[in-house]
Image (tube, grey):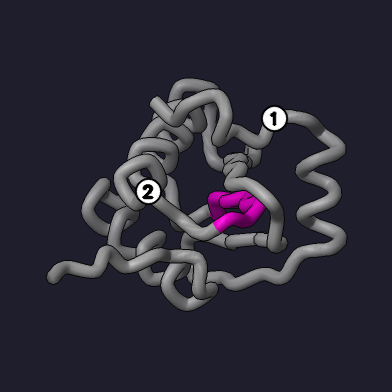
Amino acid sequence: MLKKIYRLTKHGSFGFVYRKGENKASAAFSLFYVKSTSLKVGFSVSNKLGKATARNKLKRRMRAIVMHMMPLSKYQIVVVARTPAAGLTYADMQKDLKLLFARAGILNEKKEA
């Protein structure tokens, strides 16, 4: 589970990221982000993607993928699932989100010596 200090939870915080932030998109996800003093990540899944169980499963998978990509740069980030995301496998979601984060410049590559 994504630790509480990394969660974006307030409605106003989501609105701020949507208004002031930049965005990148793929077929399955949209990524909104704005530079910040700390890392905060929020997830959004529309009712159009299915019933509560399907939406919750999608959010759990998105959280797990982002958690495994840590550490990320200091941004406030909102990941929005689009309709095609409901049909993706976990591996496809992981590849798509990693590519999206890299295109936005948020992904910190681990440097190995």
Whether 93 is among the magenta residues is no
Q: Amino acid at mark 2?
A: Met
State which quarter of the image contains the N terminus: top left
Disc 1 and disc 2 in contact, CB within 8 angstroms: no
Tell me what residue is drawn at x 33 percent, y 54 percent. 93
Looking at the image, which residue is at 69% across and 30% down?
9
Q: Is residue 59 above or below residue 4?
A: below
Q: Please, which residue is most extreme toward the bottom here?
A: 103
Q: Position of residue 17 (x, y in %)?
A: 77, 54
Which mark, by number, is residue 70?
2
The structure residue drawn at horizontal position 40% and vertical position 51%, both measured from the top left corner, is 71
| Residue 23 found in image quarter | bottom right
Per the rendered image, the range of residues in magenta is 74-82
Taking depth in this image into account, of 88 and 44 the one nearest to the observer is: 44
Q: Amino acid at mark 1?
A: Thr
N-terminal of the two: label 1 or label 2?
Answer: 1
* Residue depicted at 36% across the width and 63% down the height: 98
Residue 98's place in the image compared with 77, above or below, is: below
Give the vertical position of 15 relative to 84 (above or below): above
Residue toward you, 84 or 12: 12
Residue holding disc 1? 9
Left or right? Give the position of 49 relative to 102: right
